[in-house]
Image (tube, coloured by chain):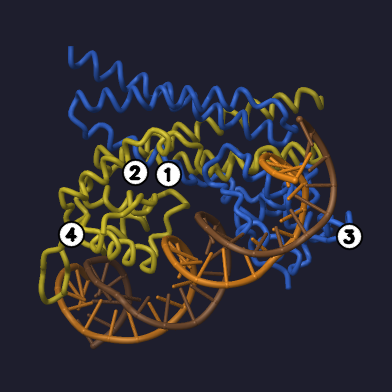
Chain colours: A blue, B yellow, C brown, D orange
Amino acid sequence: MAKQRLTELEGAVLTEIGHRGNDTSFKVRRAFERSPSSSWSGSAGAVYPAIARLVDAGLIATAPGDTRRKTRLLSLTEAGLAALEAWFSDPLAACSIGADPFRLRAGLWETLPAGRRSEVIAAMITTVRAEMAKLKGRDDLDPVERIGNDLAQMQQEMRLGWLIRTKTGRMSGCL
Amino acid sequence: MAKQRLTELEGAVLTEIGHRGNDTSFKVRRAFERSPSSSWSGSAGAVYPAIARLVDAGLIATAPGDTRRKTRLLSLTEAGLAALEAWFSDPLAACSIGADPFRLRAGLWETLPAGRRSEVIAAMITTVRAEMAKLKGRDDLDPVERIGNDLAQMQQEMRLGWLIRTKTGRMSGCL
DNA sequence: CCGAACATGTAACCTGTTACATGATTAC
DNA sequence: GTAATCATGTAACAGGTTACATGTTCGG
């Protein structure tokens, strides 16, 4: 009955329901769709089955909402709240490295010939700046999401700093 | 025949073969197993089928190696090299946000009662320091992987800074 | 000789993606 | 009225995880 360990998606679903006021499956799904992170597609085929699993595991309770639209209001059970806290308090899971597309690719840019490398680095700088502007423009965030958004901005700033250091370091060597 | 778009795993496989001297399926797999990132399991059921797909797509060429052990030596075809470069040069893919377990959880720590929150933050600080030490201890890295390792360290340093700022900020309010 | 590491793969299962299907409500 | 949004799901497919199966080579 009780789930062994929550996936990232399941933890995020419990977060949406427990701390972000998204009380229907649709709102949870839409929240993922609007997330700036590329790892959340918010596809119905992922979110609805995940919620169904969590209901089966006794972590989410359902109550009838607007009956004409057959909406189901979702809330965390006590077990769900405990599972969520266990999920987000686990240091090994929280502090692990994760999947960063930038980190995965950055080493390869150095293997390019100098001209092409400058082009690619310049394109990356432009794109990081654009992504950062998007993150800064988000203003309808609750406190929980605000912190995630701040951390995402800090990561983009870190990338930008690295790109600029790399560029100037290499360029000065080429002149 | 040609693949439409490479997944992160497929791009990483081509990287291992093209720029890290891992010329057999087993070495590629072992490289993923030893990666500090939690997103690579290096499971045979992921790596071998991925390589098979890339061979089918004409991106990887195979040559017989030690025949007794039926090893196959892998190398990138011209198409494979081009696909790899397209993969790592795409700015939108490279600069997207990715899946960060820390960012996903950090907002929730603030929802804990003060005592529990201090405990959790302290545990996170300890774990981030330990992870950072592991990253610093890795010394058998080629140039491509070295850059990825540096970026991972920078991210852990960023996390540590955030944790300490959060802790002191909150603690001073509590005193 | 025996265990660890090398070397390659498969099968069952679970999860996520894409695309489809259905229908109600709201804004113009 | 009609297009967008709300609202809930399913089916086919792709991909990853776990566990298993098989055999070789090397160090002690």
Of tags 3 and 4, the one toward the viewer is 3
Same subunit, labels 3 and 4: the answer reads no
Q: Is residue A129 left or right of residue B20?
A: right
Callout 2 environment at 10 Å: few (<14), some (14 to 19), or many (20+)? few
Position above or below: B10 against A100: below
In the picture, the disc for residue B74 is 4
Position above or below: A142 against A19: above
Of tags 2 and 4, the one toward the viewer is 4
Percent position (x, y) of residue A42? 61, 49
| Disc 2, SS | loop
Q: Quadrant of residue A168?
A: top left
Disc 3 marks a residue whose amino acid type is Pro
Query: Are circles 3 and 4 on residues that touch, CB within 8 Å?
Result: no
| Disc 4, SS | strand
In the picture, the disc for residue A64 is 3
Q: What chain does badge 2 belong to? A: B
Circle nearer the N terminus (4, 1) = 4
Identify the residue at horizontal 26%, vertical 46% (top origin).
Answer: B83
Q: Nearer the viewer, residue B13 or B101?
A: B13
Alpha-carbon span between mark 3 and mark 4? 57 Å
In the picture, the disc for residue B138 is 2
Q: What chain does badge 4 belong to? A: B
Same subunit, labels 2 and 1: the answer reads yes
Same subunit, labels 3 and 1: the answer reads no
Disc 2 marks a residue whose amino acid type is Arg
In the picture, the disc for residue B134 is 1
Identify the residue at horizontal 69%, vertical 35% (top origin).
Answer: A145
Q: What chain does badge 1 belong to? A: B
